Amino acid sequence: MTGSEKNTYHHGDLRASLIQAAISLLPTKGAAHLSLREVAKVAGVSHTAPYRHFEDKAALLTAIAQTGFEQLTQSLLEVVKKQQNDPEQQLISAAEAYVDLGIANPEMMYLMFGGVLEIDSLSKTFSEKSANAFTGLEQIIINGQALGIFKSGDSQSFAVSAWSLAHGLMMLLTAGQLRDIASSSEQKKQLSRTLAQNLLTGILK
Amino acid sequence: MTGSEKNTYHHGDLRASLIQAAISLLPTKGAAHLSLREVAKVAGVSHTAPYRHFEDKAALLTAIAQTGFEQLTQSLLEVVKKQQNDPEQQLISAAEAYVDLGIANPEMMYLMFGGVLEIDSLSKTFSEKSANAFTGLEQIIINGQALGIFKSGDSQSFAVSAWSLAHGLMMLLTAGQLRDIASSSEQKKQLSRTLAQNLLTGILK
DNA sequence: ACCTGAACACCGTTCAAGT
DNA sequence: ACCTGAACACCGTTCAAGT
């Protein structure tokens, strides 16, 4: 018992255990109905123990959302690396990765983007994490412009366009608004590629 | 007292009064923290009275969300009518109207799209109301194709593209994710027009 | 330093009872 | 038919107390 085992239950890194417990409950309970007391129970501590590690429930939820933003940033970075020097394909794959994440973790998406958390509470998380994801997108655009593949001009508005398109599709799919159009995972991913293509080539004749 | 006044407080149309009370509380309390007991108090009835008119809290929230979908559908219809036979301008104005609604009612957007309600609970509302909004969009596309302004081809994917773009931008703005790029209402509306333009003309050279 | 248990002010929901 | 009040099983949060 010199450290090879977590000494007992309540010890080690309760903060991390609480985050882990909350993430495990998220898919079944839903972002809107996650209870701090149940998280504590799953972590094996009393319902007041979390207050030594988080100021309140919102602080715990923010910590969870942060892991979601990290996941999102990482998926996008992987996509960019795998399609080196093909900005067109990068944009299509980025949209697909975004939709993929929503399919896999709908309740995490609601937590990150559904207004569960106050905007101010997420401020720091956003500035650091979701800005990174956006910067990745902007780099794809700027690179594509340098290669002469994309139109020159307002790179920021191009990046916001791509982000909005992918984000909107992901949210509409997650909320079930497009279930008449795409129900299976494969249909959803196909739709994300088609939409990215539409943004690339435009719909004007 | 032959009908010119609502007989007393608890009478007339409590169902409508409850919906009205809930809508009035929505902006300040937030979709995530609206309490049925407080709605009842504002409506001037006991906290159990709502159960004569709604099966549960979710049913009340669904009724509120439905008014949101009606508002959305109506704004889009107005836009279409005001820009008759100019599908390009219709698409730009539709995006702007969508963003406008989000600016005016952020908590309503969270209620409609933020995962507060179960998908099944919204099923009927969606089939009837948000399908209408989408049908309006599709009509813009089909009309534009008939006029030779838009590319021929998959009109449905064009409509979903426009919807996703507007929806994503609105949600990102509402959640504060784009506050470094657009903070004032005018900047947000400008951004919506720019993005619609990007979708129209494409970003590929 | 870290955790517990009692306590408080809230919830949503059910049900017998009142008019 | 419609509404009320008590009751139940939950919440988030605070605080004195334990180790």
Image: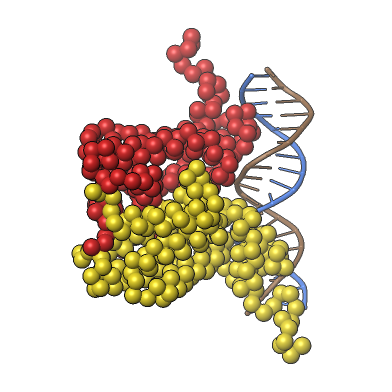
Chain colours: A yellow, B red, C brown, D blue
Q: Residue at x 50, y 42 (%)?
A: A180
Residue at 47 percent across and 69 percent down: it is A75
Drawn side of residue B32 relative to residue A37, left or right = left
Q: Tell me: B186 left or right of A73.
A: left
Determine the residue located farthest toward the bottom in the rendered image: A2
Residue at x-position 61% and y-position 73%: A16
Task: Give the x, y percent position of residue A179.
Answer: 51, 45
Seen from the viewer's position, the closer of residues A112 and A137 is: A137
Answer whether residue B152 is visible to the viewer in this image: yes
Q: Quadrant of residue A7?
A: bottom right
Q: Nearer the viewer, residue A6 or B147?
A: B147
Report the residue that reaches farthest toward the front. Answer: B153
B117 is higher (above) or lower (below) than B77:
below
Q: Residue at x 63, y 28 (%)?
A: B52
Q: Where residue C18 appears, x then y in whole percent?
A: 72, 22
* Quarter of the figure that contains the C terminus of chain B: bottom left
Q: Can you give x and y, in whole percent of width and height, for residue B32 in the image?
A: 52, 49
The one nearer the camera, A203 or C14, is A203
Q: Position of residue A108 (x, y in %)?
A: 54, 59
